[in-house]
Image: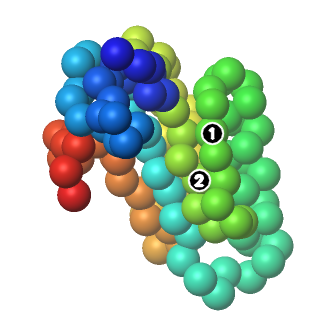
Amino acid sequence: MQALGSHQVVLSDADEVAELVALSSHRVLRLLFVPGLPPAQLNGAVDRIKKEIGMAGLLSEWSGDRHVAVDIPPNTDASQLFAIMEHEVTGGRAFWEWADAMPFSPRR
């Protein structure tokens, strides 16, 4: 058994996930900014999100300057981050989703 992120999994001989043993109860919140935002607007929003992620002590990963994934541990108050992201989404500048919308599966 191996830890993969914060899940416990069984790996096959080919080092691929063969079985999920235990969930971590963490969730991942992803946000994607729409293309073509004015740089000042995009940079301001990114700075606000990065600042709140840091203040909340959350882990995150950026893919370029428009897409972020944020690890939300159980019992974490991420309401300030949600409010910042929701402002961008309701303004039509971004889309968001919870990454755990479907159960984990070792098969594609």
Residue at position x 37%, y 42% in the image = 14
For the residues labelled 1 and 2, say whether their Cβ atoms are less than 8 Å apart: yes
> Observer-nearest residue: 42 or 9?
9
Q: Looking at the image, tell me whether mark 1 or mark 2 is earlier in sequence order.
A: 1
Residue 60 visible, this angle: yes
- Left or right relative to 10: residue 96: right
Q: CA distance from mark 1 to mark 2?
A: 7 Å
> Which numbered marker is on residue 60?
1
- Residue 108 point in image, percent of width and height: 22, 58
Residue kind at label 2, given as amino acid type: Val
The residue where tag 2 is placed is: 68
* Residue 95 figure quarter: bottom left
> Observer-nearest residue: 64 or 96?
64
Judging from the image, what secondary structure is the residue with disc 2 in? Answer: strand
- Residue 7 point in image, percent of width and height: 37, 23
> How many C-alpha atoms fall within 10 Å of the one at disc 2: few (<14), some, or many (≥20)?
many
> How many C-alpha atoms fall within 10 Å of the one at disc 1: few (<14), some, or many (≥20)?
some
> Observer-nearest residue: 107 or 56?
107
Image quadrant holding the N terminus, namely top left
